[in-house]
Image (cartoon, rainbow, N blue to C red):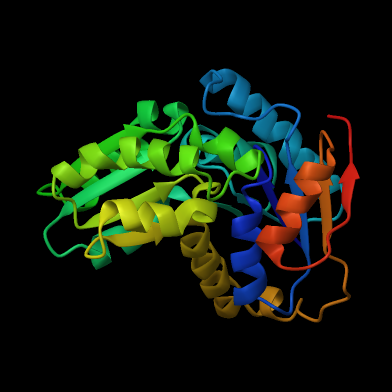
Amino acid sequence: MIGIFDSGIGGLTTCRALKQALPGHDMIYFGDTARTPYGSKSRETVVRYSLENSRFLLEMGAEMIVVGCNTASSVAPDAIRKAFDVPVFEVVAPAVEQALAASKKGRIGVIGTRGTIDSGVYETRIKAMLPSATVHSNSCPLLVPLVEEGWFNRPETRRIVKSYIHPLRERQIDTLILGCTHYPMLQSIIQEKAGKRVTIINSGSAVAQQVKAFVEANPEWRDKGGRTGGDRFFVSDYTPQFRSIAESILKQKVELQLVQQ
């Protein structure tokens, strides 16, 4: 069973990508909706939340952890690996690899929460792999609340996305990393505001391909396939709105189970 956690509902985009890449494996998802967003929290707090989330998933039967939150991915994976003897994947590294493969001019944009952007994790990793790359980043603190509210195509949302993307478009980026797993829910608007020549990199889809490659390369994991229909979805706070958003992301009926962290 593959365990995925995120600061809220948006990480279900990563779960969706994993379900498409590995249809033979069950998923268990935890969205920390009571404590979202993580992007405005301190490093220490995000690490603590990430360890708590990982422990919960493992207690519920997960045998692998996928950190579906970019903020947590920027600060917590090493702590999770140290605490738990299971494979741990995060969304930053595979997104960087896909962006570098896609970019023709080495002009890469990154959008994310304040926590992710302030950490500099994307710029650091991009520069380590391609020192000549130019990286332009912009924090987008309003996008997670908009997604959590289900405001996917409101005029207000379109104006806010435009204000965040415009400075990057002026920098003539050719590739844009969605540095938050909530953002794929706004991808069509982001693409429109970035321009059709800009390649969009979805970090959730990128990590799904990395996990798939790992499973296929390791017989002990490949042989764990065989769905039982046991996908489970947990949240730390529940509203009917969360369920509606979850179903719009996964394109299926979803039962969200409430758990106190």
Residue 239, by quadrant, is top right
| Count of marks placed on residues | 0
Q: Look at the picture and state if 143 lies above or below 20.
A: above
Relative image position of residue 12 (x, y in whole percent): 66, 54
Which residue is pictured at 62% across the width and 49% down the height?
11
Relative image position of residue 258 (x, y in whole percent): 90, 40
On the question of residue 94 being in view, the answer is no
Image quarter where the N terminus lies is bottom right
Which residue is pictured at 49% across the width and 44% down the height?
180
Q: Nearer the viewer, residue 54 or 34?
A: 34
On the question of residue 206 being in view, the answer is yes
Which residue is pictured at 76% across the width and 76% down the height?
224
Which residue is pictured at 36% across the width and 37% down the height?
121
Instruction: Decide if residue 255 is on the left or right side of residue 130.
Output: right
Residue found at the very far front of the displayed protein: 155
Relative image position of residue 91 (x, y in whole percent): 49, 51
Relative image position of residue 44 (x, y in whole percent): 57, 19
Q: Nearer the viewer, residue 247 or 123?
A: 247
Q: Look at the picture and state if 108 lies above or below 17.
A: above
Image quarter where the C terminus lies is top right
Instruction: Decide if residue 223 is on the left or right side of residue 238.
Output: left
